[in-house]
Image: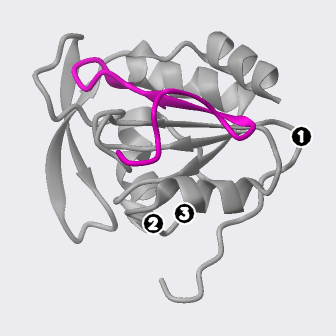
């Protein structure tokens, strides 16, 4: 992906940087109903993953309020792999080509726009506690609940207040 640059956000809505591990794909013992999905990117590989049953509705609610960008180790595979399971739009959301130092990449990407970052508890542990951070909001999900624990209205209000 050398030379890839994520499409810029619209600037009309806050940006949501979205992780996958522990957020969309529950790696821990699930405490919410899940469904196993076979995910693949371009048919080159297949992986079985546990995704919360309510994840598509949560993602749709977030997409109504935020410009979403993937911030995940899944990189360019994220949208393609999860589109069927999550009912994502045909037009892929941009992705940040990072696995580490996500917070720095997110801050550079949003360039002063309001933002939130939803990820698992182990991503960038050194710099990313829950709460407000330089005009944005960081949410560390419970790895047994994932995205189901994120309320779109509450997150949008928190992002608005963080400005």
Quarter-of-image position of residue 7: bottom right
Disc 2 and disc 3 in contact, CB within 8 angstroms: yes
| Residue at the far front in the pictured view | 126
Q: Return the residue at label 1.
A: 12
Give the residue displayed 71% in from the left and 26% down from the top.
64
Residue 97 sits above or below residue 150 on the image: below
Residue 7 sits above or below residue 33 on the image: below
Q: How is the image coloured?
A: one colour
Query: How far separated are the C-alphas under marks 1 and 3?
Result: 20 Å
First reached walking from the N terminus: tag 1 or tag 2: 1
| Residue at the far left in the pictured view | 29
Q: Return the residue at label 3.
A: 96
The circle on residue 98 is 2
- Answer whether residue 58 is magenta in the image: no
Query: Is 69 left or right of 78, judged from the image as shown?
Result: right
- Answer whether residue 138 is magenta in the image: yes
Give the residue displayed 20% in from the left and 24% down from the top.
35
Residue 94 showing in the rendered view: no
């Amino acid at each position: 992906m050398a030379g890839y640059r994520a499409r810029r956000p619209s600037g009309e809505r806050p940006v949501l940087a979205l992780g996958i591990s522990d957020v969309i794909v529950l790696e821990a013992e699930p405490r919410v109903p899940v469904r196993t999905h076979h995910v693949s990117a371009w048919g080159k590989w297949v992986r079985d993953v546990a995704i919360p049953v309510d994840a598509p509705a949560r993602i749709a609610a977030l997409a109504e309020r935020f410009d979403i960008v993937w911030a995940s180790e899944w990189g360019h595979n994220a949208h393609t792999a999860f589109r069927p399971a999550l009912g994502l739009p045909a037009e892929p959301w941009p992705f940040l080509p990072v696995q580490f130092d996500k917070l720095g990449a997110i801050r550079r990407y949003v360039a002063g726009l309001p933002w939130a970052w939803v990820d698992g508890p182990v991503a960038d542990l050194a710099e990313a506690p829950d709460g407000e951070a330089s005009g944005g909001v960081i949410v560390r999900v419970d790895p047994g609940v994932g995205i189901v624990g994120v309320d779109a209205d509450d997150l949008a209000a928190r992002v608005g207040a963080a400005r």
